[in-house]
Image: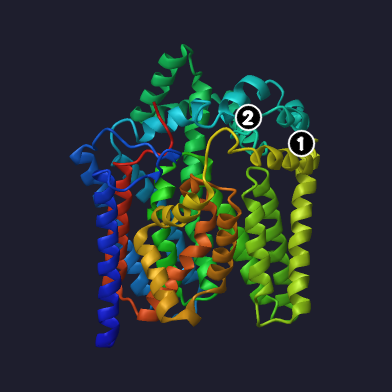
Amino acid sequence: MSAGDKRKIDLVLGLAAMLVLGMLTGIYTRDLPLGVEGEWEWPRVRKEPAFARLLIAATGVAAYGGLAVLGYRALGVSSGRAWREMGWVAGLTASAAALQVFIVVGAPEGFGPTKWAVIHCLRESTGYYEVARREAAHSPAKFLADYPNWIAERGADHLGTHPPGLIATYCGLLALMERNDAAADWLTAATPPSMVKGFEQVEAMQELVIPRADRAALYLASLITLLACAGTVAPIYLLARESLPPRFAWATAALWPLAPALNLFQPLADAGYPLLSATALAAAAWASRLRERPGVGAWASAGLATVSGVVMAFGMMFTLAFLPIGLIVALIVLTTRSIPWTRRFETIAWIGVGFLAGVAIARLATGADPFAVWWWNLHHNSRFYDGGRRSYLPWLLVNPVELAIAAGLPAVVWGLAGVITELRRVPRTFWCALAVVAITDLSGLNRGEVARLWIIFLPPLFTAAGAGLAGLGGGLQAVLVTILLTGVQTLGLQGLIQLVFPP
């Protein structure tokens, strides 16, 4: 490494440190607004985390940083063996899940697993569990078949703007726990005491009793979200690996589970959606790459393209945020210069086949027309801001800043370094995603809450951070410091901002 590159790396890390500390200080002193004043702002935490719990969380971040460094060093040595990469990524996935558990331990009292129970149960937060229990659980098939009529009567809220995927998931988990007493007992016994406290708070507030099977189902739903969020490191690695060497793809994936938004929004399903978006994007990117090869490569490409379409169709059963993901997928395929246009359009066609197959399966499984549901979702979403004043220009400027903080400022700084110093190294997946994010911002459809709403866009944007490390030749120290700085930002924000409105 030249002295010039070392100075550049020190500059990147120094800038990241100043941004993190400056941002946390500004929020703590209330000099930095948490939205647009007079329109909408994120609420602040009024409790401080216990030092012992914060120390435990910091220890988890440090241990994870050590693993990230080991993997970065190991994958820097070329072996040509795919199973070796798979082994390291599997280890990273398990470590990501453990890390997110450590991070939540460091939250102030009432804002850790306690909120998991509250968020599931309160209609003001989501409402999907309440609908599943009160309206759908007695006959899920009938409820889903009639969903187009049910959604037509809803307003411009969370329920009115979403397909029935989450309600169906809650119904399935409730039925599973009611029919499996042993599993319900085991999950109930394994539920963290702080989450039990959350259930007790809800029972006291609403003067009801949450059945044992329901508690087990809600804890299982929380675990599924956490594991899906952690498991996103695997498709992110594959997405980055399509354009970057192993060690820099590893660095890209290793930053993921530390991203502030992913941890602060647990256990909302938004934290789990990136698993689907990253999988769809990675499958499409590799489908395009394999299309260069004749014979088996062509069939493998068709298979991956179909998988990408099916995954997006599945995601569309939960949120319409997969519409812009579909646009990113199309752009990734169409900007693959190594294959002729005919093969690009063939890949798009296979993706379409997969998507339509997924939609057909959903239609057969539920009896409802997904397109009718989506039409009503879009109709309600168009009226989402009718009830309150949301200016266009302020949110146009605030949204990118909020997204950068949600991703983690150190990762953003490395991404900017890649764009500035090694433009050619930056994967096309980043540019495609950035273009769609810019279009979404300019559309004015999201004026606030993009830290949650745009989580689904983060996986392809993270690839620029790996390109920045590759361009400057970042070593073990750079990776470790980046991990630790991101951990500081996440733990700091967790003690300052509350994003899911517990009581």
> Can residue 162 be seen from the camera position used here?
no
Write down the quadrant of residue 342 in the picture.
Answer: bottom right
Which quarter shows the C terminus? top left
Q: Residues within 10 Å of mark 1 (few under 14, many from 20)?
A: some
Q: Would you name the residue on which mark 2 appears? A: 171
**Amino acid type, residue under disc 2 in the picture:** Cys
Residue 132: x and y in percent read: 62, 26
- In the image: residue 124, left or right of residue 291: left
Residue 124: x and y in percent read: 51, 27
> Can residue 28 be seen from the camera position used here?
yes
Q: Is residue 211 above or below residue 53?
A: above
Q: Residue at x 56, y 59 (%)?
A: 437
Q: Residues within 10 Å of mark 2 (few under 14, many from 20)?
A: many
Q: Would you name the residue on which mark 1 appears? A: 366
Which quarter shows the N terminus? bottom left
**Amino acid type, residue under disc 1 in the picture:** Thr
Between 256 and 441, the one nearer to me in the picture: 441
Q: Residue at x 64, y 48 (%)?
A: 315
Looking at the picture, the colour scheme in use is rainbow
Q: Is residue 232 above or below residue 178?
A: below
In the image, farthest residue toward the top: 207
Decide which of tag 2 and tag 1 comes sooner along the chain.
2
Q: Is residue 492 above or below residue 87?
A: above
Q: Residue at x 74, y 50 (%)?
A: 358
Question: How many numbered callouts?
Answer: 2
In the image, farthest residue toward the left: 51
- In the image: residue 308, left or right of residue 349: left
